[in-house]
Image: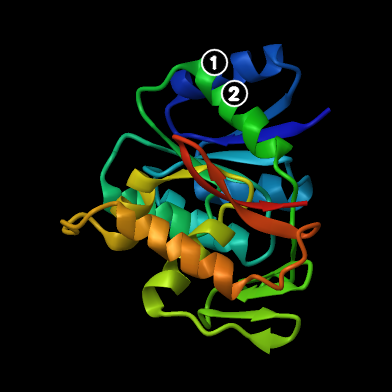
Amino acid sequence: MKSILIVEDEAAIARVLGAYLKKAGFQVTHAADGAAALEIFGASPPSLILLDIMLPNMDGFELLGQIRKISSCPVIMLTARDGIKDRLAGLDGGADDYMSKPFIPEEVVARVNAVLRRPSQWSDGSGKRHFGSLFVDFSARSVFLNNAEVSLSPRDMSVLLFLAERPNQICTRDQLIELVWEMDYEGSDRAVDLSIKRLRQALSHWPAEEGEIRTLRGTGYQLWTV
């Protein structure tokens, strides 16, 4: 049975989430603050963490940073703040997904199942990932294919890193414009398509059986990996 750790200081929300997750077949534990969450995590690492941002003493961002130092355990952040900066901070900090409050419990369960279905890629725990022969170093903002460095423009590199942080997730053009080009961008979303085209050319020697950048017609793009 897969286990979910709910880190939420509002007891009523934690109870509702716990009830729905248990009904869906998950084992559930609850922590009301960051210190308790780290203690539970150290004793019995869960399959996934539902992490509220607004916590006492140690906020969700800080707790996420502590977790990412020791584990790649999937994390879905829960927030009453729907600002772009909060979303970007969570995703950049290593969150796998985020949901804004108020939310529908059934949707939370669906998101949990979706994140847990994603194939995991090997990571050495230092902000680096291997997707077969494709090696991505997020902190150094560098990419190597077959041990040769891939030359990319800063913007194209940002797009690739954004996709690589969310393997097998669908990223819409609007998300890329909002979170990579940022809100003040006033150009056409055609810029996203051109960037993807250049990335495909740069990664043309990446074996198809290991992965590829896919277009999901009418939806967006996805860094698909096995």
Helix, strand or loop at disc 2?
A: helix
Is residue 58 in view from this perspective? no
Residue 27 coordinates in the image, percent (x, y): 75, 25
Badge 1 amino acid? Glu
Residue ID for mark 2: 110
Q: Using the rendered view, name the quadrant where residue 52 is placed.
A: top left
Rounded to the nearest angstrom, the CA distance separating label 2 from label 1 is: 6 Å
The disc placed on residue 156 is none
Is residue 100 in view from this perspective? yes
Residue in the foreground of this view, choosing between 204 and 59: 204
Tell me if mark 2 has few (under 14), some (14-19) or many (20+) residues whose alpha carbon lies within 10 angstroms of its own: few
Residue at x 32% of width, y 34% of height? 80
Badge 2 amino acid? Ala
> Quick check: 138 above or below 92?
below
Residue at x 70% of width, y 37% of height? 116
Residue ID for mark 1: 106
Residue at x 61% of width, y 58% of height? 67
> Quick check: 223 above or below 124?
above
> Quick check: 39 above or below 19?
below
Residue in the foreground of this view, choosing between 29 and 112: 112
Helix, strand or loop at disc 1?
A: helix
Cβ atoms at labels 2 and 1 below 8 Å apart? yes
Would you say 178 lies left or right of 209 here?
A: left
